[in-house]
Amino acid sequence: MAKRMTCSCLGFAAMIATAAAQPAAETWIPASRMAQMLTGRVTFTPTELTFQNGKSLPLTGNGQMLFRPEPKAKKVLADLYKVTSPESMTLEGGNSVCKGKPVAYLLVWTADSAGKPARMLAVYSGPKFTPGSPDDCGRFAYDARTH
């Protein structure tokens, strides 16, 4: 009996550790006109970005970097994600995020917007990530909620 109880407890502890290791999903509500028109509401985890229409991009973390979101703006620390299966995304209203090119990289950071934190997303196409290149598909602003 004691042996069976030990196994059950170890199994339960492993389930708790696995659940604790999973990052909480964030729901991002569009805060910019561009985000409203193209992506709609977004659900983000470090392994997947899911758009309002149900399409998603599988992600893998690719480190952090200092990034200047706008010319002459202060640099921010952003998380870089590589899309593991780059895909052209047709989203809200038949609009495309990268003018029909596959989405390959994402930069995600937190910005201060009117005194409250906002999640920012920069989208890139192309085989190599290069800020300021023609592969820059735009910036999107969101209000974020963790659940």
Image (cartoon, rainbow, N blue to C red):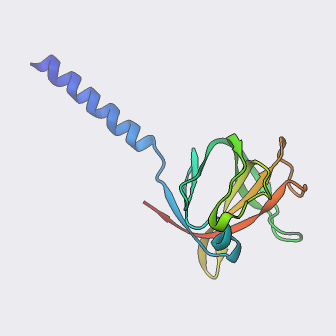
Q: Position of residue 51 (x, y in %)?
A: 58, 58
Q: Is residue 81 left or right of residue 53?
A: right
Q: Nearer the viewer, residue 75 or 128?
A: 128
The residue under the point 76% across, 48% down is: 102
Q: Is residue 84 left or right of residue 98?
A: left
Q: Nearer the viewer, residue 2 or 32?
A: 32
Task: Say whether residue 110 is visible.
Answer: no
Q: Position of residue 3 (x, y in %)?
A: 16, 17
Q: Is residue 83 left or right of residue 145?
A: right
- Residue farthest to the bottom? 114
The residue under the point 12% across, 20% down is: 2
The residue under the point 72% across, 57% down is: 77
Determine the image quadrant of residue 96. bottom right
- Residue farthest to the left? 1
The residue under the point 61% across, 80% down is: 115
| Quadrant including the C terminus | bottom left
- Residue farthest to the front? 94
Determine the image quadrant of residue 33. bottom right
Q: How many marks?
A: 0
| Quadrant including the N terminus | top left
Q: Is residue 136 left or right of residue 108?
A: right
Q: Position of residue 64 (x, y in %)?
A: 72, 48
Task: Say whether residue 145 is visible.
Answer: yes
Q: Position of residue 85 (x, y in %)?
A: 68, 39
Q: In this picture, is 75 found above or below 115?
A: above
Q: In this picture, is 59 found above or below 5?
A: below
